[in-house]
Image: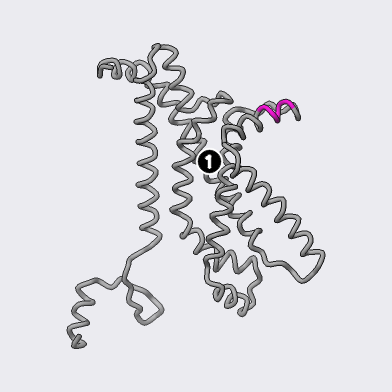
Amino acid sequence: MTWSSIIKIIVKYWPMFLRGAGVTLYISIIGTILGALIGLIIGTIRTIPLSDNKAKRGILKVINTILTIYVEVFRGTPMIVQAMVIYYGSLMLFNIDMDKIFAGIFIVSINTGAYTAEIVRGGIISVDKGQFEAAHAVGMNHIKTMLYVVLPQVVRNILPAMGNEFVINIKDSSVLNVISVTELYYQTSSVTGNVFRFFEPFLIASVIYLVMTLTVTRILRFIEKKMDGPENFNVIPGNQMQVARPEDMAKKANQSGY
């Protein structure tokens, strides 16, 4: 390996690497967002308390059984197998020839949704039961309790896990090359066929993957800090809130004799 050969490959084939990285990011972003929405809906449904009404209770049990099967199947099988079954199965069984990019987004979305559903369910369960009771005491039903009390806390708590899912999707989108989605791995394989070398093109691809994942991680950590807000607050008259500066807190403590 020489640095000159790597530079030559980059100079000649950078449009292919760029297109592959763009498709990878596009599928990962859309798939993660849709998967998060699917997970939020399923996680919320699976935590609905059983009704005393026998009909409603039976319907909810059937729905929970179907959702549990979906979650277990997609968490228990590899994405590469899911891609083959869904893409070629839809063509063979239903004569549906899906667009490859659409198929990639669909596969990533439902796979992410299965994992996110469990993340959301765990986040909802972790919320103190007293908050549910307080919301019901002021007249909120289950849906309003979820929308206005529980889910805002859950979204913040699961943000690190969702960031991890996003990073995983960037890397795991490489398996979509089996259905000829022109993402980064597919484009890199095409480059290797042109230059008859494997190490240099895949070294370039690994650097691109690393840059994408590190960038996404830094952005998500920045968002987490913004959502956390300042560490110290002082409540002042007028129901307003202001940040308590450390020097002001020290001054107040000295005046109080502590």
List x then y, in percent, for residue 83. Answer: 60, 32
Residue at the spot of label 1: 30
In the image, farthest residue toward the bottom: 257
Left or right side of 14 for 173 = right
Q: Is residue 40 left or right of residue 8?
A: right
Which residues are the magenta region?
A: 88-92
Q: Which residue appears at 78% of the width and 59% of the height?
A: 59
Percent position of residue 177, x then y: 53, 26
- Is residue 240 found left or right of 157 in the rendered image? left
Q: Which amino acid does label 1 sit on?
A: Ile
Q: Quadrant of the C terminus?
A: bottom left
By secondary structure, the bulk of the magenta-drawn segment is best described as helix
Write the residue at 58% across / 58% down.
121
> Is 3 left or right of 104, judged from the image as shown?
left
Residue 50: x and y in percent read: 71, 67
Mark 1, Cα crowd under 10 Å, few <14 / some 14-19 / many 20+, is: some
| Secondary element type, mark 1 | helix
Picture layout, residue 6 above or below residue 116: above
Question: Where residue 79 sits: x, y (%)?
Answer: 57, 36
Extreme residue in the front direction: 76
